[in-house]
Image (spheres, rainbow, N blue to C red):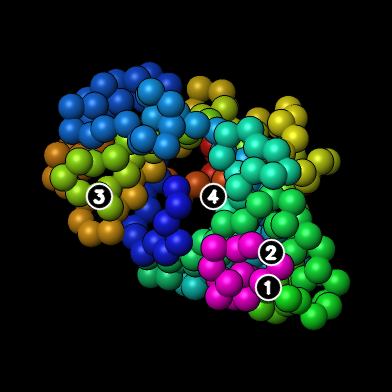
Amino acid sequence: MDHTLFNRYEFKYLITSEQYHQFREEIKSKLTYDPYGDELGRYHISSLYFDSDDYKLYQETRQNVRRRQKLRLRIYNHGELESLSFFELKQKYKNVINKRRTNLPLTKAYDFVDHMRGRRELDYSQYEASDQKVLNEIHCFQSVYGLKPTVIVSYDRQAFLSIDNPTLRVTFDYNLKCRNDDLRIENDLKGTPLVHHDLIILEVKVSGATPFWLTKSLSEFKCKRQGVSKYCTSVDVIRGISNHHKIL
């Protein structure tokens, strides 16, 4: 979870809990648990997403704009103000995901958000970021779109890694919730369910081609590939918009 640059494909599937248990058992012989998680590769994720007052980033995704971006601030497990957080600028272009990331203490991240929204001159060195260039890019992106904290999405994840291909990851996200009444990601509050309790988001993340054995397993277990945006779905849920993807 400490990499600063990603270039890869990400394929999402919406599966039931029954498919999850069956598919997970199938891939355990080929993959290993993510060492960043517990003994079963599990950890918690809370992400604060940013958008403009008129939801420009939301609209880009919903309208399937060819080049689209997201900005989020993320912590793993249940952090505190001094915990390490991750600012991520994520871009999708021609099905390729490019993600730039810098880490810094959560309290510094909040301070950075306050400063960049105040349009004051920033001294990037004071934020203790692992990559100052990424922090500068985030500030420029925020200025162009007029971004502000919008919604929090939290969920539990079980992650698997390939021993033979270090770029291959398979993750299962469940217990997905969202909220916009408290935008402090260190506060572990109950949110509104993002999808039906029996549904799980499966993601295959890989830099090159998906291995044949994995493609075959996905087909055998009838895992249906579906474009599921956690951020856009959370906005729909909070704004009371009927979900045209029918995943609720």
Image quarter (top left, top right, bottom left or bottom right) of the C terminus: top right
Vertical relation: 142 (above or below) 17: below
**Residue at 45% from the left image edge and 52% from the top image edge:** 2
Q: Return the x and y of residue 165 as percentages of the image width and height.
A: 20, 49
What is the distance, in whole Å, between disc 4 and disc 1 at their CAs?
Answer: 31 Å
Kind of residue at disc 4? Ser
Give whichever of discs 2 and 3 has the lower sequence position: 2
What is the distance, in whole Å, between disc 4 and disc 3 at their CAs?
Answer: 25 Å
Relative to 79, 210 lies left or right:
left
Residue marked by disc 1:
124
Residue marked by disc 4:
229
Kind of residue at disc 2? Tyr
Which residues lie in the magenta part? 125-138
- The reply to whether the C-beta atoms of the residues labelled 2 and 1 are less than 8 Å apart is yes
Q: Residues within 10 Å of mark 3 (few under 14, many from 20)?
A: few
Residue marked by disc 2:
127
- Is residue 134 visible in the rendered image? The answer is yes
Give whichever of discs 4 and 1 has the lower sequence position: 1
**Residue at 32% from the left image edge and 44% from the top image edge:** 169
